[in-house]
Image: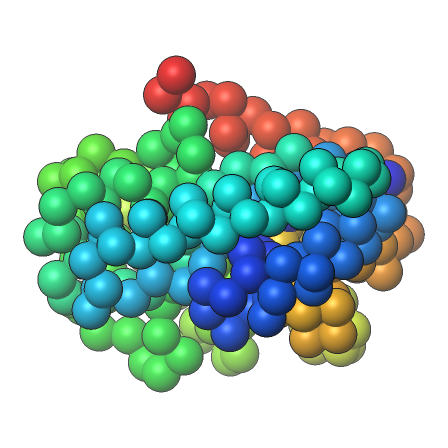
Amino acid sequence: MRYIDFHTHILPEMDDGAKSVRESVAMLKAAEKSGAKTVILTPHYQTAMPISEFCAKRDEKLSLLKSAMKKDGGKFPRLLLGAEVAIDGSLCDKPDLEKLCIEGTDLLLLELPYSSWNDWHFQEVYRVIAERNLSPVMAHIERYLKRPKDIEKIDKLISIGARFQINAEPFLTFSGKRIIRTLAAEGLISAIGSDCHSLRRRSPDISYAMEVFAKKFGDAFIDYLYNKSEKLLSEHSNK
Ligand SMILES: [Fe+2]
């Protein structure tokens, strides 16, 4: 089984994810064992921090991680830098916003709040496209679909031009599985992510989720999802 992990908190000491380089290495090994061919490193970004400062810290942590991986000598997935960017009303006014995109692409992983959304949330997603010429991917979209009426939010985001990433964790619950199967059947899932924060808190091993997918839609679906995520990266490549 192979997949691209689109959403992780593996970079050490960047946020509430991996607490040390050692933990990061262990998480990457678990991801590789689970079938991850590419892991996108998406530490939390909030607008209070200048983007230049965030990127400098991210580069420093990546360099530490790469040294440890080299020293370890094990097999690891390909790594791409990115960020999980929390929406706020000033996001599109930030200089260098494009530096938060997934490495080599114009894809920006955006996180919406748990609480209800207002018009300005949708407007901000739209501004990312219209004013900054970037392509938003909405993080863990299943998290916001609790009631049947919530599907209207998805329709609005589709009309704006957003794409969707789901987390693997909801596969552990009946209601989560139901939501994800519905999204999958509608062809709305562009990417899957572990959203791992440690080996235990949303583990980087998401083989259980891929097995559910395979059981429901067949092994071909796993390849379809992998190819769709790979295509998303290549179609949005700016290299
Ligand atoms: Fe996350």
Q: Vertically, is 159 above or below 75?
A: below
Which residue corresponds to the image point at 46% horizontal and 59% vertical from the top-left? 43
Which quadrant would the N terminus be assigned to in this image?
top right
Q: How is the image coloured?
A: rainbow
* Residue 14 percent location from the top left of the image: 46, 63
Q: How many marks?
A: 0
Residue 32: quarter of image: top right
In this picture, residue 111 sits left or right of residue 1? left
* Residue 129 percent location from the top left of the image: 23, 40
Q: Vertically, is 111 above or below 60?
A: below
Which quadrant would the C terminus be assigned to in this image?
top left
Most distant residue in the top direction: 239
Q: 202 or 158, which lies in front?
A: 202
Which residue corresponds to the image point at 36% horizontal and 83% vertical from the top-left? 115
In this picture, residue 177 sits left or right of residue 78? right
**Quick check: can you spot residue 201?**
yes
Most distant residue in the left direction: 93
In this picture, residue 226 sits left or right of residue 237? right
In this picture, residue 89 sits left or right of residue 109? left
Which residue corresponds to the image point at 74% horizontal and 41% vertical from the top-left? 71
Residue 156: quarter of image: bottom left
* Residue 18 percent location from the top left of the image: 60, 66
Which residue corresponds to the image point at 67% horizontal and 28% vertical from the top-left? 227
**Quick check: can you spot residue 163?**
no
* Residue 200 percent location from the top left of the image: 75, 74
